[in-house]
Amino acid sequence: MRLTSTRTIYFPLLLILAFACGKKEEGCELSSEIINQDLTVKITRLEQDFFTAKTVTEFKYLFEAHPEFTKEYLQMDLYPSPDSLAAELLAIHQDSSMKVLYDSVEVAFRDFSDVEKDLENAFKAIKYYFPQFQVPKVYTFTSGFNSDLIVTDDLIVIGLDYFLAPTHTFQPELPRYMAERYDRPFIVPMIVMAISARFNETNPQDNRLLAEMIYYGKTYHFTKAILPCTSDQYIIGYTPEAISESFDNEELIWSHFVENELLYETNPFEIRKYIGEAPFTDAISTKAPGRLGRWLGWNIVDDYQFNQDVALDVLMAEPDAEKIFRKSGYRPRKVNE
C-alpha cells in the first residue's frame, strides 16, 4: 500500500441519439414508484477513521469494527497478523506524501452528499428491476493509489484518491486516456456497471467478438436504465465530441465490421483491437475512439430492447448474443436521421 503502487481494479456501463455535454439530461427522472422505496444509503468515510488512528491498538479496533472492509480491501489474509497490517498502515500514514494526498482528498470530497444520493437512487432502481438485489455496505478510503474500486455482493469500497480531478497534482499511474475517466462524475456509473455483471447472463462457449460486443452493450444499457439522468460520456467514457463523431461516422464504422467479417472473429488479438482499452481504434482510424466494439454493442442492444420491448431483467438474462443481434434490427443511423 504505497503511494506509487499501480495495482488497479478497473470496472472498465434507452436510445442514445442525443449527446448531452453536461452531467444531467432533461426529462430523465426516475419514477416515483422507484424513488419512494424505503431504502437508504449511508456511505462510511473510513479514510477519516484510519487516518486519525495513532496506535496499533486503534487500528486493530477498526479492523474488528469493519471486518468485511479489512478482509476484502485491506487483504488481511496476506499478513501474518493484525499487528503487522496495523504497523504497515501506521507507517504509511506517517509518510509526508500520503498526508498531503489525504488532505487533498478531504478538501475535494468534504461534501460527498451528491454521490451518496445518486448511489441511493441507483440502488433503488436496481432493487426495483431486480428485487433479489441486496444493498451492500459502502465505504470510502484513501489508499495511496493502491485500489480504485472494489464491488462485491456485500460491500463497495471507493478509493477516493483515484477520483481526484484529472488536473490534480497527484495522479494514478495510468495512461492519460484512462486517467481522464477517473473523476467524480464517473464514480456512480462505474459502480453500477460493476453491479450489472451479476445480472448479465452470457454463453461461456461463445468466444466471438459479437458476444463481447453484446456483453458490453448490455452493461451500458443497464447502466443507462438505472442512471437515466447521467450523460452518456460518464457511462462509456467518451467525450461528447467523440460520441457525436462516432454517430456521424456510424455507417463507416459498421461497414468496417461487416466487410472484415469481424462479428464472428474468435482471435483474441483481433477482438482486443475493438474491445480492449486503447486511446483509439487504429484499425479504423487514429481519430476513432477506443473500444468501438463496445460502443456498437450498446447501439445494437438499445435497438433490440426498443424493437422487441423487453424488460430490463429479461434483457440481462438473455445469454444468446446472436439472438439479440438478429432481432435488434440494427442499422447505422444516418447523420441527419
Image: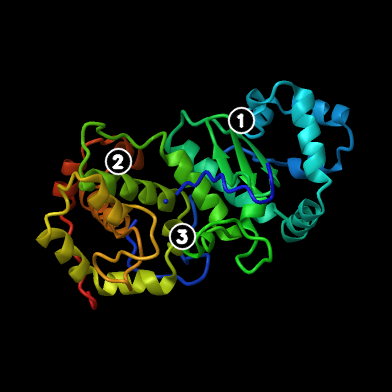
Locate residue 189, reporting x and y percent.
50, 52
Q: Is residue 123 left or right of residue 160?
A: left
What secondary structure is marked by label 1? helix
Residue at horizontal 47%, vertical 64%?
177
Q: Secondary structure at mark 3?
A: loop
Determine the residue positioned at 27% across, 53% down.
297
**Spatial distance from mark 3 to mark 1, Cα to Cα?**
35 Å
| Residue 276: image location, x then y, percent | 35, 52
Q: Which residue is mark 2?
A: 315
Alpha-carbon span between mark 1 and mark 2: 31 Å
Q: Is residue 34 visible?
A: no
Q: Is residue 233 left or right of residue 140?
A: left
Given this view, does label 3 or label 1 mark the residue nearer the observer?
1
Q: Which mark is residue 72?
A: 1
- State the image coordinates of residue 240 (x, y, percent, origin top left): 43, 71
Residue under the point 67% across and 53% down: 161
Q: Amino acid at mark 2?
A: Leu
The quadrant the N terminus occupies is top right
Residue of label 3: 28
Amino acid type shown at disc 3: Cys
Q: Is residue 54 above or below residue 331?
A: above
